[in-house]
Image (cartoon, grey):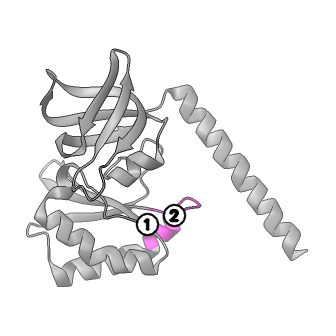
């Protein structure tokens, strides 16, 4: 698989160094590092580490790997300022932080905010149609279907992107997940009997 093309803050050197530092810990826990995001809560800086797993991630898994991530960040010290560390799942309306995230969510609804205007606008909302990456290219574009037509947006212009579902779609996602969890639990119980 090719090297991911990251968007927004993940292009910052210190965030990239933090991702590089914690990647082995995350991989050893058989989890996937989605990305790192910085936010402010009052005067406090929060460093969010988003993790996932092919079967979904639990709070327990986040809690188990959090001390190891914290220890690596303390030793490597890629983020110079003080921060509170939060290790989390990306959630239903997860952030999309790389070309890989966009590729995995083709045909899903998305909200995108740009670093600078593209065709006179900084915000796009629509459905992901495809990710276009030329062979050996360092950059990629995402094609979006919006109400006013299709737009080709360079990933390098994206500040933030996240999945964006209606309330009914979110309810359906949770029903589907609960059903899958019940089925897995029943299968597990049947195997032990």
Q: Residue at x 88, y 68 (%)?
A: 190
The quadrant of the image that shows the N terminus is bottom left
For marks 2 and 1, the one nearer the N-term is: 1
Q: Is residue 3 visible?
A: yes
Q: Residue at x 17, y 57 (%)?
A: 11
Which span is picked out in magenta? 52-63
> In this view, which residue lies farthest toward the bottom?
75
Crowd band around label 1 with a 10 angstrom C-alpha radius: few (<14), some (14–19), many (20+): some
Horizontal arrangement in the rendering, residue 89 relative to residue 12 (left or right): right
Check contact, mark 2 vs mark 1: CB within 8 A. Answer: yes
In front here: 138 or 67? 138
Q: Of the numbered discs in the image, which one, if any, rests on residue 32?
A: 1
Please give the residue where the numbered disc 2 appears in the rendered image: 53
Q: Residue at x 31, y 49 (%)?
A: 133
> In this view, which residue lies farthest toward the top?
148
Q: Secondary structure at mark 1?
A: strand
The quadrant of the image that shows the C terminus is bottom right
- Residue 109, compared with residue 43, is above or below; it is above
């Amino acid at each position: 698989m090719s090297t991911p093309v990251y968007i927004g803050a993940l292009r910052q050197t210190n965030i990239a160094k933090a991702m590089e530092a914690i990647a082995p810990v995350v991989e050893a826990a058989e989890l996937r590092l989605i990305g790192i995001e910085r936010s402010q809560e009052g005067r406090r800086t929060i460093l969010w580490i988003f993790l996932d797993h092919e079967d979904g991630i639990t709070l327990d898994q986040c809690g188990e790997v959090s001390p190891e991530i914290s220890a690596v960040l303390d030793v490597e010290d890629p983020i110079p300022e003080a921060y509170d560390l939060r290790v989390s799942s990306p959630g239903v309306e997860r952030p999309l932080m790389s070309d890989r995230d966009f590729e995995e969510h083709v045909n899903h609804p998305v909200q995108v905010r740009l670093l600078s205007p593209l065709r006179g606008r900084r915000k796009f909302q629509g459905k992901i149609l495809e990710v276009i990456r030329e062979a050996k290219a360092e950059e990629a574009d995402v094609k979006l279907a919006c109400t006013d037509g299709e737009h080709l947006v360079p990933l390098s212009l994206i500040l933030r992107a996240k999945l964006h579902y209606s309330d009914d779609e979110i309810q359906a996602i949770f029903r589907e997940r609960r059903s899958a969890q019940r089925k897995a639990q029943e299968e597990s119980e049947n195997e032990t009997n």
